[in-house]
Image: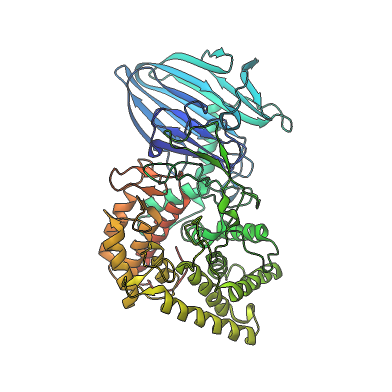
Amino acid sequence: MRASHIEDYGYLADGRSGALVGRDGSVDWWCPARFDAPSVFARLLDDDGGHWSIRPAGEYDVQRHYLDDTLVLRTVFTTGDGSVSITDALALDRGRGHDIGRNPPCVLLRQVEGLSGRVPMVMSYAPRFEYGRVRAHLRWHGETLSASATGATLGMTATVPVDRHRTDASASFLVEAGQRETFSLAYSSTYHQPEPMPADVPAALSDTVEAWHSWAATHSYPGLYAPLVRRNVLILQGLTYQLGGPVVAAATTSVPVRPEGNDNYDYRYVWLRDFNLTLRALSIAACPVEAVRLFEWMAEAIGDVGLEPVPIMVGVEGERDLTERRLDALGGHIGSGPVLLGNDAWHQRQQDVLGKIVDAAWLLRNNLDPLSEDVRRLLRDLVEQAMNTWRLPDSGIWELRDDLRHHLTSKVGCWVTLDRAVRFGERLGSPAELERWATTRDEIRDAILRDGWNPRVGAFTGAFGIDQLDASALVLPLVGFLPATDWRMRATIDRVERDLTTDGLVRRWPHDSAGFVLCSFWLVQCLTLAGEWDRAATLFESIAGRANDLGLLAEQIDPRTGRQLGNFPQAFSHIGLISAAWRLTQAAIGQSGSTGTAG
């Protein structure tokens, strides 16, 4: 098994899907139809899963970076014979500004340029359709090397001679200083789209850079760590399914979140439970256009929910059934299976999702004013759910697949639902309803303070009646439930720092084997709200510095080795960074407070 760690990858995106490119010039993950569609390259999860590699023939050193304000990747290989660069991108369409990625051509662009000397290069192309299950015969159609299987067609072009080997292809070529060679790979649906056309790679790369720049030019972030935040919101844009606006949790499936492996999940879906965090990050560092579009997509995806449980996650076009299944064709990332498609957490009850959606509406209240009848009905349904179900146990924010519990953050989510509903006032309910909502809100608050606080532990714990410390308690001041300076909250922060934190990385619970990046940024926000701004800034910079050389973050980081763990890039982690930077900005300009949305 080829051992490329997840942080060794760069990320490309086109508004429909994403691709991972290793430091060795190998494209090892691409699901071109959309984020959660079958792959054509999956060497990320198995040596035989398919890849497309271009690299020097001999030993080399690597440096790489994104072109400014883009997700166009430039990798420079330095060898004993000279140096070359490879520029990689998923082509964008002709849309500009807010419209980029609405109709991408589904073309992977690769351009090799000689920088010095004369460097021997090798290319290896091994498409494997439907997660490595199917090898297709390669055939020349004019200048295009074509492969079709499972309803998908790939067409590769190259300016160097390519040798076809039945289901694979290869090339060996020499690149001198000033020389340029180009490659393209176009995807299409075999039966519903025309045969993919060869791309003018230099022109398509230039157009793609221009498209990314047009998006960046319409967005600004006025706070601290501006270059870092701009890069992170660009990554969120790359995780956005642009046809509707939802942000997927990550671009991959089944990358283990534990150093020992085997704790694998498919994250190529949209978590409504994380909705307000995503929307807040977009509001901070992008602009209301993306945030409002995301809210409208969410409202349509949920539909007329009534008193039925709200889904915690859906597909990128709102699909509900994400039933999980095991894929035995792939052995797993660095041999750590299983590989899973789908995610059985889709049918869990998680009460905090109610508060995430109503809180998001409160954040966008000026943009949603006046409330449309559909949005008003949705919010009222969610309020009634919180009223009727807040006493029920659920699966909790960490999606545990064991016994249901009375999770702290779930009760807080119900409190947030009613708190924001009362703030909406008569835009949402009658005076009698507002009084009833306020009464239940206060009842939930009393229950949390009584049963969520554990005097034996000296902190808020993860669920009522248990002694296990849980970093999710850090959200209480972030949603305005308690100020960070409250003695109970201050004690909880101190316990999280003492018992769950190693080198600035916060574990979710004592037996969690790695630091959870989002929780670490929550700690930054709590310290900021507690007035410990210098400590918060130092911690922020330490966590942000653990991103890979391209600024990309997975879900967790092993404090022993510094290795990133989990699916990649992880939206949660980048959202946490953006929100923490903004919280530090608010403190710096004297506008911090203990109320607001979680993030």
Q: Could you say where residue 414 lies in the image, as x and y percent from the top left?
A: 53, 72
Residue 223: in sight, yes or no? Answer: no
Locate residue 441 relative to residue 301 in the image: left or right: left
Q: Nearer the viewer, residue 360 or 219?
A: 360
Among the 4 quarters of the image, the one containing residue 139: top right
Which residue lies at the image location 61% right of the left edge and 75% below the top edge?
388
Q: Quadrant of the N terminus?
A: top left
Count up the numbered dots.
0
Which residue lies at the image location 63% right of the left edge and 57% below the top edge?
297
Q: Could you say where residue 265 lies in the image, as x and y percent from the top left?
A: 50, 46
In the rendered view, would you say 343 is above or below 108?
below
Coloration mode? rainbow
Q: Quadrant of the C terminus?
A: bottom left
In the rendered view, would you say 348 is above or below 443?
above
Locate residue 584 relative to residue 232 in the image: left or right: left
Among the 4 quarters of the image, the one containing residue 463: bottom left
Q: Could you say where residue 330 lies in the image, as x and y percent from the top left?
A: 52, 32
Locate residue 460 relative to residue 143 in the image: left or right: left
Q: Could you say where residue 4 lies in the image, as x and y percent from the top left?
A: 39, 32
Furthest-front residue in this view: 403
Which residue lies at the image location 40% right of the left edge and 68% below the top edge?
466
Residue 555: in sight, yes or no? Answer: yes
Locate residue 540 relative to residue 404 in the image: left or right: left
Q: Nearer the viewer, residue 212 or 481?
A: 481
In the rendered view, would you say 227 is above or below 459?
above
Among the 4 quarters of the image, the one containing residue 379: bottom right
In the rendered view, would you say 337 is above or below 117?
below
Furthest-right residue in this view: 191
